[in-house]
Image (spheres, rainbow, N blue to C red):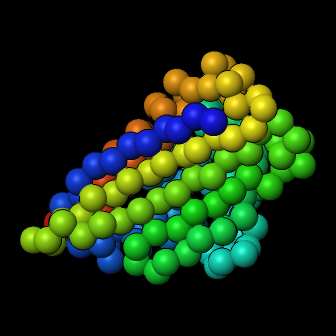
């Protein structure tokens, strides 16, 4: 297993972060890593993602396996070929900091007998993608709050 985790402070209340994070239709406007999400945002639903991983574009299916409205959610890999060798769990958490701010944490855990291959080949691209998406989320939420 390996973990990629990134956290940052967003100068906005948790509700503002939640609104942007769960508006899948707007992802192409602001998210450089998960460029598109199609599907219904609900526990147990499978969504299809277009992910920009370095120079590669991947189309993957994820099942929403955790959902705590206003606080976070998680999805897991659903492709049969991925499940044989590796699978992932990506979680998004929002913690209020007070004074209208919050901490956003984005974590990707990769499991399985070939997780080390994913880390070696895509580890840095995964880190870069998650961090870029988190910075873009911060910018979008804060711009909306200041408008």
Q: Residue at x 35, y 65 (%)?
A: 94
Could you tell me how many numbered marks the image carries?
Answer: 0
User: Which one is nearer the viewer's eye here, 145 or 87?
Assistant: 87
Q: Position of residue 72 (x, y in %)?
A: 46, 69
Q: Is residue 60 above or below residue 19?
A: above
Along the horizontal axis of the image, is 26 left or right of 53? Answer: left
Along the horizontal axis of the image, is 62 left or right of 23? Answer: right
User: Which one is nearer the viewer's eye here, 29 or 9?
Assistant: 9
Q: Is residue 144 visible?
A: no
Q: Residue at x 46, y 31 (%)?
A: 128
Along the horizontal axis of the image, is 9 left or right of 23? Answer: left
User: Which one is nearer the viewer's eye here, 130 or 76?
Assistant: 76
Q: Is residue 116 above or below residue 10?
A: above
Q: Is residue 62 above or below residue 52?
A: below
Quadrant of the rendered image containing residue 144: bottom left
Along the horizontal axis of the image, is 27 left or right of 87? Answer: left
């Amino acid at each position: 297993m390996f973990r990629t985790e990134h956290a940052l402070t967003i100068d906005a209340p948790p509700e503002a972060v939640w609104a942007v994070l769960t508006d899948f239709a707007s992802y192409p406007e602001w998210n450089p890593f998960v460029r598109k999400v199609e599907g219904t945002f609900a526990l147990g639903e499978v969504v299809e993602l277009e992910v920009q991983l370095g120079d590669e574009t991947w189309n993957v299916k994820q099942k929403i396996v955790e959902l705590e409205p206003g606080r976070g959610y998680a999805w897991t890999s659903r492709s049969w070929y991925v499940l044989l060798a590796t699978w992932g769990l990506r979680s998004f958490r929002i913690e209020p900091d007070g004074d209208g701010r919050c901490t956003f944490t984005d974590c990707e855990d990769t499991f399985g007998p070939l997780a080390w291959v994913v880390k070696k080949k895509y580890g840095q691209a995964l880190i870069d993608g998650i961090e870029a998406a988190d910075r873009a989320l911060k910018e979008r939420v804060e711009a909306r709050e200041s408008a």
